[in-house]
Image (cartoon, coloured by chain):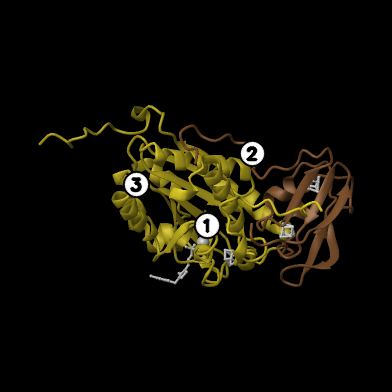
Chain colours: A brown, B yellow
Amino acid sequence: MSVAFKPITTENGKGIFHLFPALCKGCGLCIEKCPVDTIGWARQLGAFGTPVVEPGHGKPCIACKKCQLVCPDAAIWIERRNGQGRTDALTAAPQAPGNEK
Amino acid sequence: MAIAAQPQMPRVWRAESKPHKFCPGCGHGIVLKALGEAVDALGIQERTIFGCDIGCSLLSWDFFNLDTIQTHHGRTTPVLVGIKRARPELVVVSYMGDGGAYAIGAQHLVSSASRNDLVTIIVVNNTVYAMTGGQMAPTTLPGQKTETTPYGRDVELTGRPMLGPELVAAIAPPGAYVARGSVANVVQLKNYIQKGLENQIQGRGIAFIEALSSCPTNWRTNAAETWRFLEKEMSAYFPVGELRTPEEKPAARLREVPAHGPKP
Ligand SMILES: Cc1ncc(C[n+]2csc(CCOP(=O)(O)OP(=O)(O)O)c2C)c(N)n1
Ligand code: SF4
Ligand code: SF4
Ligand code: SF4
Ligand SMILES: [Mg+2]
């Protein structure tokens, strides 16, 4: 990636919550999908001058990645605290045979 | 120094054009994430052509690191079918809204389905003509308030909402892949789109995927109401699931038509 986005990184429960304010449009879809209600509005402002989101408003994060999955703007990356979260696929789909680049 | 964490965008997304042009909470971004993941998983970035329609779908003209073309309502499909016929090794994706696909350009969808064209069509169903301000679309739900149905859609006057995948499933020959997904289930939607791309790569027939999607701007909904409308009201009228798979026995659903046409 030739452009870089600056994260706000917050550790919470089982997750490391990376939020990219330049991408977050403050839609709130992630807040509604979090099963432990930990996501809430933050003080920082995002892409459109609306508040971005942060964890720490409910029970501890369980690193389910639902918020990352539904964010239309890829503004959240949840890293698992054991360090195994570095995956960019929705599912770990293997390369289809015959289609290798 | 360790590299700072970066957004986990699909590799085929064009990071330079992000944040993208869709409104906050728009489902288009989620559908294009599922499409991006499917293209990544199949490793077809170098040979995929992306076509977008008129409507909010055109805001994706610089969304991907893919050769991209933007055409008129519903014409995206025949334009991409033309590209496919000229260059069969390419993988072509026709990305449209419900208004473009089911009303203004519906004839192209019907023709492509009956020809079983090798194209993967994705229709984003947000129940309105979003780009022009939220007028009633063929997919507007009974009783739904829009700019042009301020008292709610009257089905006596304007008919019932159009069922796109059901229509394509009814007319497409064997080999077609037809499904309806939702941005409320991104993993399932990605799997449907990936199967739709594979159907084209394997030369089996048309692939048609409708995605139930959100338009908070024209629905005038907050996040909680957006999810409720999508998951309760839309999903109740438009059932999510696969309607046609290329492996199925065609007899149950379709009359077998001889390859050379009916006997004179
Ligand atoms: C022939 C024609 N009629 C009308 C229009 C105006 N128009 C532009 S976008 C649009 C609505 C598109 O709605 P949809 O396909 O559902 O896409 P969305 O914006 O909802 O994603 C209309 C009617 C047009 N461009 N061309
Ligand atoms: S990963 Fe799951 S639990 Fe953690 S903030 Fe996101 S939605 Fe909530
Ligand atoms: S879903 Fe994404 S863009 Fe919307 S508020 Fe959450 S992080 Fe921000
Ligand atoms: S008007 Fe609706 S469909 Fe168009 S970008 Fe905004 S939210 Fe998305
Ligand atoms: Mg629409």
Q: Position of residue B51 (x, y in %)?
A: 43, 58
Alpha carbon distance from label 1 to label 3 = 28 Å
Badge 2 is on which residue? A91
**At numbered mark 1, what does the secondary structure look like: helix, strand or loop?**
loop
Numbered circle sitting on residue B6: none
Of badges 2 and 1, the one in the foreground is: 1
Badge 1 is on which residue? B65
Picture residue at 48% right of the left edge, 45% below the top: B44
Chain to which mark 2 belongs = A
Q: Residues within 10 Å of mark 2 (few under 14, many from 20)?
A: some
Q: Residues within 10 Å of mark 1 (few under 14, many from 20)?
A: some
Picture residue at 40% right of the left edge, 61% below the top: B103
> Picture quarter containing residue A64?
top right
Q: Residues within 10 Å of mark 3 (few under 14, many from 20)?
A: many
Q: Compared with residue B196, is residue A71 higher up or lower down, i.e. above or below?
A: below
Numbered circle sitting on residue B113: 3
Pick the front one: B249 or A11: A11
Alpha carbon distance from label 2 to label 1 = 21 Å
Pick the front one: B153 or B65: B65
Check mark 2 vs ligand 2: CB closer than 8 Å? yes or no: no
**At numbered mark 2, what does the secondary structure look like: helix, strand or loop?**
loop
- The outermost residue toward the front is B1
Chain to which mark 1 belongs = B
Pick the front one: B66 or B103: B66
> Picture quarter containing residue B168?
top left
Q: Position of residue B165 (x, y in %)?
A: 45, 46
Q: Which amino acid lies under the numbered mark 3 shown in the image of this protein?
A: Ala
The disc, 1 or 3, on the residue closer to the chain's N-terminal end is: 1
Alpha carbon distance from label 3 to label 2 = 30 Å
